[in-house]
Amino acid sequence: MPAYVIASVTVSNPKEMDEYRKHVPGTLAKYGGRFVVRGGALQVVEGEWKPNRLVVIEFPSMQQAKQWYECEEYREPKAMRLRAGRTNLVFVEGVS
């Protein structure tokens, strides 16, 4: 069953976030991850959610999503992201 990493990101250090964005794609392939949404234009049509930048990454399974998040390859890029802004992030199972 597919799983998704969904993140709402508020950037406070654009230079470091740009560097982070260069490193992330190379960490995904080993775990079967691929970007579905990566900060494109968005429009809130219901509710009060106001994400600044929305990212959705699809993985073949929840296990692979969690393995990617905790892997050695993503450790330094994750630290960059944490320094570059504030993130709300969830893992959610998709439907098969």
Image: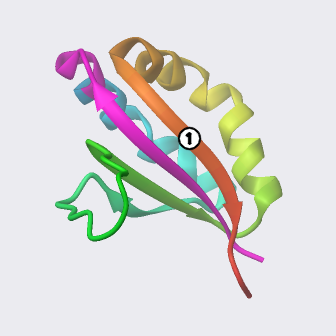
Location of residue 16 by image quarter: top left
Residue at point 18% right, 18% down?
15
Residue at 47% in and 18% down: 82
From the image, tell me which residue sits under label 1. Answer: 89
Task: Name above or below for residue 69 compared with residue 62.
Answer: above
Q: Is residue 17 left or right of residue 15?
A: right
The segment highlighted magenta reads 1-17
Q: Residue at x 33, y 68 (%)?
A: 46
Q: Nearer the viewer, residue 36 or 45?
A: 45
User: Looking at the picture, how far across and down is residue 81, in whole percent?
Assistant: 42, 23
| 8 inside magenta stretch | yes
Q: Position of residue 73 (x, y in %)?
A: 61, 30
At label 1, counting other C-alpha atoms closer than 10 Å, the crowd grade (few under 14, some 14-19, many 20 or more) is some
| Residue at the image position 26 percent from the left and 42 percent from the top | 52
On screen, residue 76 versus residue 93, left or right, reads left
Please name the amino acid that badge 1 sits on.
Leu
Give the position of the C terminus as an image quadrant: bottom right
